[in-house]
Amino acid sequence: MVPHLPAAGIRNAIEAGDWPRATELLAMHQSELAETLAATDLSAVAREPWFDLLLAQRALLAELRDARNRVAEAMERLTEDHRRARAWLRELA
């Protein structure tokens, strides 16, 4: 049996800023996946469910990368805004 990717739970935890829970869910999935793979003869099972899991994992990873990139861009904007505010304050002094 192919392990279930708790994508919704991971998304919800990240959305709530509960990074320990998101990390825990990812670790649990990784552990379950490793155990299942170790006990499975992949030559004797249907491949489609495994490919579906791989696609779901890749989609979640893409979402996480996009979120990381958005955060990095927001941090760059904040840094630039801070720099401009400091320059403006220096001119006022």
Image (spheres, rainbow, N blue to C red):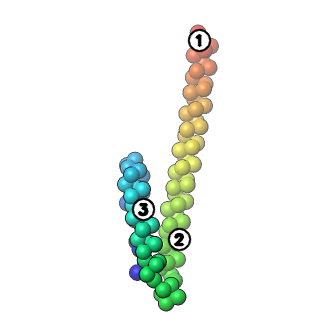
Q: Which quarter of the rendering shows the C terminus? A: top right
Residue at 42% in and 62% down: 27
- The foreground one among 52 and 1 is 1
Which comes sooner in the sequence, label 2 or label 3?
3
In the rendered image, residue 75, in percent from the top left (x then y), is placed at: 55, 38
Write down the residue under mark 1.
92
| Disc 3/disc 1 C-alpha distance (Å) | 52 Å
Q: Secondary structure at mark 3?
A: helix
| Disc 1/disc 2 C-alpha distance (Å) | 55 Å
Circles 3 and 1, Cβ within 8 Å, touching? The answer is no
Write down the residue under mark 2.
55
Q: Secondary structure at mark 2?
A: helix
- The foreground one among 30 and 60 is 30
The answer, for residue 46, to whether it is visible in the render is: no
Q: Which mark, residue 27?
A: 3
Which comes sooner in the sequence, label 3 or label 1?
3
The three-letter amino acid code for the residue at tag 2 is Leu
Q: Secondary structure at mark 1?
A: helix
Question: Extreme top residue here?
Answer: 93
